[in-house]
Image: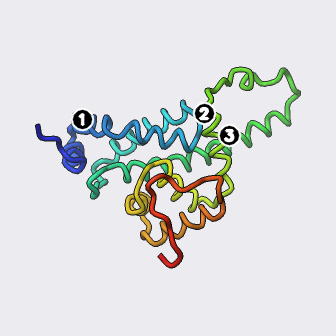
Amino acid sequence: MHVPTDVALWDSARAGDAVAFGRLYERHARAVQAFCLRRTAELQVAEDMTSAVFLEIWRKRHRIDVTTATALPFLLGVATNMLHEHWRRRRRHDAAVLRIRNATPRATQGHEDDTIARIDAVRELREARAAVRGLPRRELDVLTLVAWGDLTYEETAIALKLPIGTVRSRLARARARLGDAFPAPVGAPVSTEGS
């Protein structure tokens, strides 16, 4: 049985074939969601981001070319950009809520704290995210795409539209800053000076 490549499915999707687009979604939605979950440590946000990524590429399909054997680097690049926008909106929202709280008398404590119940895996993801939170954004993006998105250096370079040497140097700097807090992913090549 012939299994169409991502490029063939994308070409069909660009022509309006929703079935081909659905097959791309089936192939990559779990990986996109897992990547978003690792970046946010919030299941609902990860699910929403995954939907938003596929909705965005469907809307812009006529302007997008998938040039790699797999569409995953492209999808994770879109997810990375959408996550940055999500965090910008969240920071603005949190600042507005804080201003309102400071301007109004305190009623009862927020119910949010009482309703948040997370499984151990989510807590571990938050701890991992906290360990990398202090990294500069450009290093964080590279590290998370390689370590949590399971992309190769080449795929990460494509996802972020960077030269591969820049990917390698940013990853090396991120690992140096984190030390043992974030070991190299299994199977990842060890970066050496001058590479």
Q: Nearer the viewer, mark 3 or mark 1?
A: 1
Residue to which mark 1 is pinned? 18
For disc 2, the marked residue is 122
Q: Which corner quadrant holds the N terminus?
A: top left
N-terminal-most mark, 1 or 2 = 1
Q: Are marks 1 and 2 in contact (CB under 8 Å)?
A: no
> Do we see residue 81 in this rendering?
no
Please report the residue visible at 45 percent of the width from the left and 62 percent of the height from the top. 189
Q: Which amino acid type is shown beneath numbered disc 1?
A: Ala
Going by the numbered disc 2, the residue's amino acid type is: Val
What is the crowding at mark 2: few (fewer than 14 residues within 10 Å), some, or many (at least 20)? Answer: some
Q: Residues within 10 Å of mark 1 (few under 14, many from 20)?
A: some
Task: Tell me the element at label 1.
Answer: helix
Of tags 3 and 2, the one toward the viewer is 2
**Cα–Cα gap, marks 3 and 2:** 23 Å
Q: What's the residue at 47%, 39% (across, down)? A: 34
Q: Verify CB contact (< 8 Å) between mark 3 and mark 2.
A: no
Nearer mark to the viewer, of 1 and 2: 2
How was the colour assigned to the protein in this rendering? rainbow
- Earlier sequence position, callout 3 versus callout 2: 3
CA separation in Å, label 3 and label 1: 35 Å
Residue 168 spot, x, y in % from top left: 49, 68
| Front position in the image: 177 or 187 | 187
**Residue receiving disc 3:** 93
